[in-house]
Image: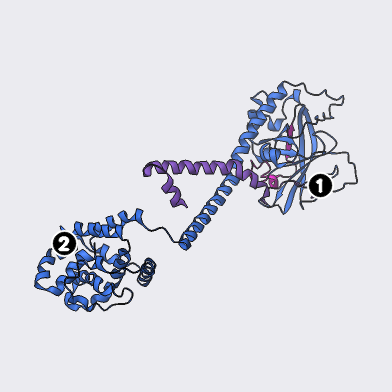
Chain colours: A blue, B purple
Amino acid sequence: MVNSPSSGNESDADASSRPTIRPAQRQNSSHHPAHDQYPAQGGYRGREASPATEPMSTAPELGGGQNSGAGSHPGTGSQAGTDQPLPSRRELRRREAEAAAANGAPTAVYSDAPPAYTDSTQVQQPVSSETNPNLGAYAGAAVAGYSAPGEGSRRTNRRRQKPEREPLGPVRGTIRTFGELCITAGMVLILFVVWQLWWTDIEANRDNEQLADKLAQDWQNQDPNELPDDPDEPVVADPVEKNSAFGIFYIPRFGDDYYRTVAEGVDLEPVLNRMGVGRYPNSAMPGEVGNFSIAGHRVTYGKPLNQIAQLRPGDEIIVQTKDGFYTYTFRNFDIILPDAVEVLAPVPNEPKFKGKDRILTMTACNPMFSARERYVAYAELTDWTPAGDGAPDNIKDSKAYDKVSKNGGA
Amino acid sequence: MYGLIWRLLPGNWFVKLIFALILIAAVVLLLMQYVFPVVAPYMPFNNATVTDGSGGQ
């Protein structure tokens, strides 16, 4: 017990002042199975003894020798670790790597040893070194030369050496940094996916609610347009500036609480990404004869048109503006290529004709998460309710309309 | 790289940990607030509009 800490410290000092000792020790420990060739020292003694041969066998010839016949020098054991001429660092590193490669975990044997193991050898050591020079050399070297077979000292050893470890060579340093950069890139990609799929929805929905509230409040302070003489003829909404909202979509098929603002323009920023759906410039306004065309995200950014494929013929799409409620009825859908702008014509797909119907065209990406095609849904104006008459029946009791109107909407 | 950052951080391990978490949070915020919105339009999965190819929308 007395020897153990002192020897441990000594080897620590060695290790700190001349860290090149360490590889030699490891090298030796890797050798020990070879020393089972001493049958007389069976059991733990045999194992313990094998490190003792380190100064003799491995110092002159670190790489190769199972030949530890040098047991005949009793005196050298204790100081062997410090007196040997040291090979170059590179050489030591190479040997260490070789040894590590040769047998996977050379230290396992020692760390697995029971605690009593250390004690017994140390007790025996003074006796045996006198009576049996050979064995004494082994045992003495085992304690002193091979610094720390015990678990505790080994552990402190390792911990203490940590700050002092040599910096990585240029190659290993580069490889490690490269690996860390790869991991970082992976994390950033994961974060991007999380942001795109989850965070943009949250942001866009929050923005959209605020925008709808603000819009409803603004409507309160504005006079609706004068109603036409014919009660069946809808008021045509006034055009608005680019990137400003002018209406609210309610689509009961998309959910009882579904509503999204519609704004002028189809730029990603700020309209499509933050203001719900966007109206194609130069298309008709709600209520106008022609094609009132809008675009909206089907995924991400609040996904206003996420369920566009769930629409069934006859489903109603209600657009609320300052003037009232325009009820469009879904007729059919199509899947088109991204450059098929003719779907925005007053008579969809027939750009030559002027048309006399009030059409609503909605475009979204198709398939989801792809820009390969577009999903387009056509609806036709079927009803119109002036703002003064209140909301149409199908949204009057919906959560969405409650939410909008409680802030003073039309 | 990360080892270097860890060594440069002041204090004991607990203080280092707090600093490291703050750094991570700052990086995440920076990415989500400024970098991703710039990158997102180049991603091929949120084009909702039909164009004639000249609009670039």
A384 in magenta: no
Is residue A374 found left or right of A195 in the rendered image?
A: right
Position in image of residue B12 (x %, y %) = 36, 43
Quadrant housing the C terminus of chain A: top right
Please report, as a chain letter, where disc 2 is located: A
Residue in front for this viewpoint, A210 or A242: A242
At horizontal 27% and vertical 72% (from top left) the residue drawn is A32
Among the two numbered marks 2 and 1 on one chain, the one whose residue lies closer to the N terminus? 2
- Secondary structure of residue under mark 2: helix
Amino acid type, label 2: Asp
- What's the residue at 50%, 58% (across, down)? A179
Crowd around label 1: few <14 · some 14–19 · many ≥20 (10 Å): many
SS under mark 1: helix
Question: In terms of secondary structure, what is the magenta stretch mainly?
Answer: loop
Q: Which of A266 and B12 is in front in this view?
A: B12
What residue is shown with label 1?
A343
Using residue A139 as the reference point, say whether residue A61 is left or right of it: right
The quadrant in which the N terminus of chain A is found is bottom left
Q: Are dots 2 and 1 in contact, CB under 8 Å?
A: no
Kindly report the distance in space between the C-alpha atoms of the residues bearing marks 2 and 1.
90 Å
Establish if A59 lies above or below A270: below
Give the residue type that dot 1 points to.
Val
Q: Residue A119 carries which label?
A: 2
Q: Identify the chain of the residue marked 1, using the numbered disc in the image.
A: A
For the magenta stretch, what is the residue range?
Answer: A298-321
- Examine the image and state in which quarter residue A302 appears: top right
